[in-house]
Amino acid sequence: YLVSKEYKNETIIKFNDFEIKNNNFTIIAGPCSIEDRDMTFEIAHFLKENGIKIMRGGAFKPRTSPYSFQGNGMKALEYLKEASEKYNLLTVSEAVGIDVLKEIKNYVDIVQVGSRNSQNFELLKNLGSINKPVLLKRGFMNTIEEFLQSAEYIALRGNKNIILCERGIRTFENQTRNTLDISAFPLIKLNSNLPIISDPSHAAGRRDIIPTLAKASMASGANGIIVEIHPNPEKALSDGKQSLNFKEFQSMVKELINLSSAL
Ligand code: PEP
Ligand code: MN
């Protein structure tokens, strides 16, 4: 396996002035959905001021209900690109299908594959030939082995710049939206050369335990987190319940910095 530990010890995802790798912790933050121009710029400005280098923002949203807000599509990608250029940020957004991938790869620095598409093998094959890193989320019904096989689909077509993301799996527990599989971090580190980050937002589905899950992820060997923030979570068009406001985000970052010096 190209993504295995036997093949290679570590894959380092290199950007201009930093790397996603072991003994490094990268924080990616931004709204679930890019809602309007103002909020996009407000968040980008906030991230820049807080030293965050990668902004997330959904444009094409994979919503469970067809009646839920589906994202602002191309307009959202334009706002994200504009804001990230102004504030010198890197960006990540989700390709929900091959058609979207063709567009999105011209707008963002990292292409996300969502949990629901984690075994969309035709999409994965197409990601194998783009020249941008892929943020591959674990399918919420997938084992760690299946997850790595999905990554292998991308690597096999030539693109080895893959960042794995544990975002919670489906269990019987209903106090959270998903169950963050903390074991995934050490197990992936044992078996794979790829970096893995944590998405405590989609795991928890509720904002109150996100900082704790973020710290647990760091202590378990995750190489970073991707977290949803919103200037006014109560008004968010998607995933408001699990979005941190700016203050909550800042205090989580402080806690993570404290933990990293203790580890
Ligand atoms: C998201 O990142 O907005 C998202 C939909 O995540 P997931 O695919 O993990 O549910
Ligand atoms: Mn979301």
Image (cartoon, grey):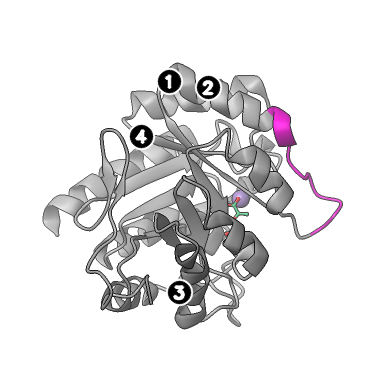
Pick the front one: 134 or 237? 134
> Sequence-wise, which precedes: disc 3 or disc 2?
2
Q: Quadrant of residue 97?
A: bottom right
Residue at image mark 2: 83
Identify the residue shown where x is 30% and y is 57%. Answer: 223
Q: Is mark 2 within 8 Å of ligand 1?
A: no
Magenta range is: 65-75
Quote the CA–CA distance across marks 2 and 1: 6 Å
Main secondary-structure element of the magenta-colored stretch: loop
Quote the CA–CA distance across marks 3 and 2: 33 Å
Residues at badges 2 and 1 in contact (C-beta under 8 Å)?
yes
Q: Amino acid at mark 2?
A: Ala
Which quadrant does the N terminus fall into?
A: bottom left
Structural crowding at the residue carrying mark 3, measured as other residues with C-alpha within 10 Å and reported as few (<14), some (14–19) or many (≥20):
many
Closer mark to the observer between disc 1 and disc 3: 3
Residue at image mark 3: 148
